[in-house]
Amino acid sequence: MHGQIEDQIREDKVKYGFSSLRPFDTTRGVFTEGGPVFPGAGILEKNHIQICVRNLNSIEGLFLPRKEI
């Protein structure tokens, strides 16, 4: 997807001298797996979210989990 956007930006710049498209700095994907945690629940057993950060300047902070004692 990012490659196609970058290709289109290049084509626009050649054709028009500019592009109104901008590449994404970050993306987020939601993945739902498994069955409901209980009957009628909207939360599934294995839901998870993945993020992709393409521009590290987008990260404003982070935390380091404590080591298990």
Image: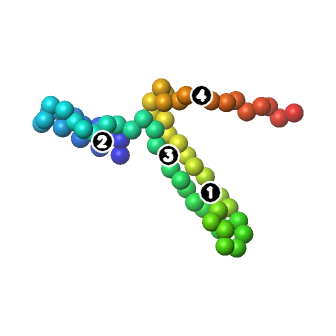
What residue occupies the far top of the structure in this picture?
57
For marks 3 and 2, the one nearer the N-term is 2
Amino acid carrying label 1: it is Asn
Query: What residue sits right under mark 2 in the picture?
Result: 5
For marks 1 and 3, the one nearer the N-term is 3
Label 2, label 4: how far apart the Cα atoms are:
28 Å
Picture residue at 46% right of the left edge, 38% below the top: 26
Residue 33 or residue 22, whichever sits in front = 22
Label 1, label 2: how far apart the Cα atoms are:
29 Å
Q: In the figure, residue 65 lies in which quadrant?
A: top right
Question: Within 10 angstroms of label 4, few (less than 14), some, or many (20 or more) residues?
Answer: few
Q: Nearer the viewer, mark 3 or mark 4?
A: 4
For marks 1 and 4, the one nearer the N-term is 1
Query: What residue sits right under mark 1 in the picture?
Result: 47
Q: Nearer the viewer, mark 1 or mark 4?
A: 4
Query: What residue sits right under mark 3 in the picture?
Result: 28
For marks 3 and 4, the one nearer the N-term is 3
| Label ID, residue 61 | 4
Picture residue at 55% right of the left edge, 46% below the top: 50
Label 3, label 2: how far apart the Cα atoms are:
17 Å
For marks 2 and 4, the one nearer the N-term is 2
